[in-house]
């Protein structure tokens, strides 16, 4: 690495006040919950789309109480992300119901007049007519539900609850201009300071987490209060991980908030855990498929389909690589979506089944390799875009991992 690209004092930039690292008055979690301000992340606003009407009402009561106590706030940027992603939630629901309609089986005719004198044959025809009639009613109901969704516009149950519960005074934002935000974000990227440093390869809204974080810091500075961030985001720029599991809030964030808020505390917790602290035990499904059951899934297996698509993209990448040492290579197609499908589906579809013991070792390896493939690929794209440094080391690692993936998938394809 050239001298000008070395960052000799990166730790000083991450932890500018060394004394604050040790001079900290710790609080127990129960003490923090007592008076802390709760700040909602985008995924928490979207989560109620995956539950029922009664649960939405219970969540509304919790929000109303906290708003009255002046203990619930929402960053402006979170609302903008909610508006952007809400459409996808409703689209997925509509798609699942539409898929369900198209996969309802038909009853095949059974016409053998010679059997007409048998009572069992007469009973069979009566039952068949009854089933056909019920299937028609079932399809009519699903069609009516689809029509109801198309008429939601901006009045779906979740958005309507927010419109009738949230008040303008709980919506806040950073005072920094867009130019100042970009400048500070770029500086933090150079020093690998979270959050947002893991989103740098995104084409759109890469700065989103940082804008939310700056808003939280300013809220903490203004209110001089502990803040609990309600988020299901488990990226490494928000949470400390161990063996792929979340351990605690990233210490860099805890320290920065402590310095900015006059010695107050910041922690992040999931939406489900937040509801439990408010006395609600509500099941929040990870997607609409689980609300309606496996019948909403297409005839094809989500896990195997996503792996098949991932293997195709990675295989095509390897084929297109011509081993030119001067060419920067990376996977051009976005594989994060397919990976998310695989990650969210394989346990639901196979855990407890006869195939689990045969498939698990493969699923485990795929779930270990794919995040590394995505991370390496994003880093190569990011550096290529910014022309900051050579990425040949990452490219070599990416190629090796992709070859391992394809090799292991070929083994896996034999047993499925």
Image: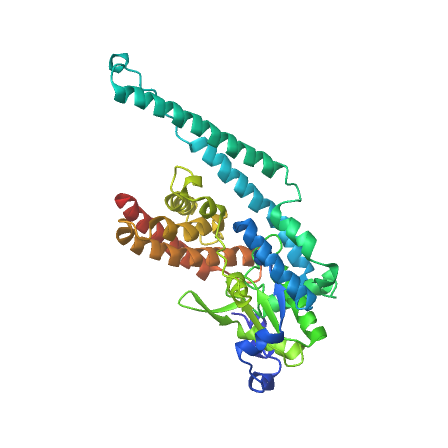
Could one spot residue 408 in this view of the protein? yes
Residue 413 placed where, x, y %? Answer: 30, 44
Residue 33 placed where, x, y %? Answer: 58, 73
Image quadrant occupied by the C terminus: top left
Pick whichever, 116 or 95, lies toward us: 116
Could one spot residue 172 in this view of the protein? no
**Image: 213 above or below 166:** below
Pick whichever, 212 or 272, lies toward us: 272
In the image, taking residue 96 as reference, residue 127 lies left or right, namely left
Q: As drawn, which residue projects farthest toward the front?
A: 119
Q: Quadrant of residue 212?
A: bottom right
Pick whichever, 265 or 335, lies toward us: 265
In the image, taking residue 313 as reference, residue 46 lies left or right, namely right
Residue 45 placed where, x, y %? Answer: 60, 56
**Image: 344 above or below 7:** above
In the image, taking residue 196 as reference, residue 154 lies left or right, namely right
Pick whichever, 233 or 377, lies toward us: 233
Tell me what residue is drawn at x 47 percent, y 58 percent: 376
Q: Quadrant of residue 26?
A: bottom right
Residue 75 placed where, x, y %? Answer: 67, 61
Tell me what residue is drawn at x 64 percent, y 58 percent: 78
């Amino acid at each position: 690495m050239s001298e000008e690209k070395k960052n000799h004092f990166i730790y000083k930039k991450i932890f500018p006040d060394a004394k604050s690292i040790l001079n900290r008055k710790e609080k127990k979690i129960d003490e923090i919950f007592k008076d802390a301000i709760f700040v909602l992340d985008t995924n928490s606003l979207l989560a109620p789309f995956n539950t029922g009407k009664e649960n939405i009402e219970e969540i509304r009561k919790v929000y109303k109480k906290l708003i009255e106590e002046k203990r619930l706030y929402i960053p402006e940027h979170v609302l903008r992300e909610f508006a952007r992603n809400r459409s996808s939630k409703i689209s997925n629901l509509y798609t699942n119901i539409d898929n369900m309609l198209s996969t309802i089986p038909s009853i095949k005719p059974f016409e053998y007049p010679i059997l007409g004198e048998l009572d069992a044959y007469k009973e069979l025809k009566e039952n068949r007519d009854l089933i056909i009639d019920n299937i028609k009613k079932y399809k009519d109901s699903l069609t009516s539900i689809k029509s109801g969704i198309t008429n939601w516009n901006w009045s779906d149950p979740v958005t309507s609850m927010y419109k009738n519960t949230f008040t303008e005074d709980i919506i806040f934002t950073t005072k920094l201009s867009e130019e100042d935000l970009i400048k500070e974000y770029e500086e933090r990227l150079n020093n690998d300071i979270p959050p947002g440093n893991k989103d740098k390869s995104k084409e759109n809204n890469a700065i989103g987490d940082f804008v939310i974080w700056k808003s939280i810091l300013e809220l903490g500075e203004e209110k001089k209060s502990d803040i609990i961030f309600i988020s299901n985001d488990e990226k490494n720029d928000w949470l400390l991980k161990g063996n792929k599991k979340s351990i605690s809030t990233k210490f860099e964030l805890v320290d920065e908030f402590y310095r900015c808020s006059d010695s107050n505390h910041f922690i992040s917790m999931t939406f489900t855990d937040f509801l439990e602290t408010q006395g609600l035990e509500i099941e929040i499904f990870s997607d609409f498929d689980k609300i309606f059951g496996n019948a909403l899934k297409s005839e094809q297996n989500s896990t195997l389909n996503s792996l098949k698509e991932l293997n195709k993209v990675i295989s095509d990448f390897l084929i297109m690589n011509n081993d030119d040492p001067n060419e920067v290579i990376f996977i051009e197609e976005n594989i994060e979506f397919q990976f998310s499908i695989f990650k969210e589906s394989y346990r639901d579809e196979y855990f407890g089944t006869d195939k689990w013991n045969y498939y698990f070792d493969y699923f485990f390896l795929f779930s270990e390799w794919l995040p590394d493939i995505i991370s390496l690929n994003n880093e190569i794209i990011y550096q290529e875009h910014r022309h900051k440094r050579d990425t040949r080391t990452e490219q070599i690692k990416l190629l090796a991992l992709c070859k391992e993936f394809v090799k292991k998938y070929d083994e896996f394809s034999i047993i499925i």
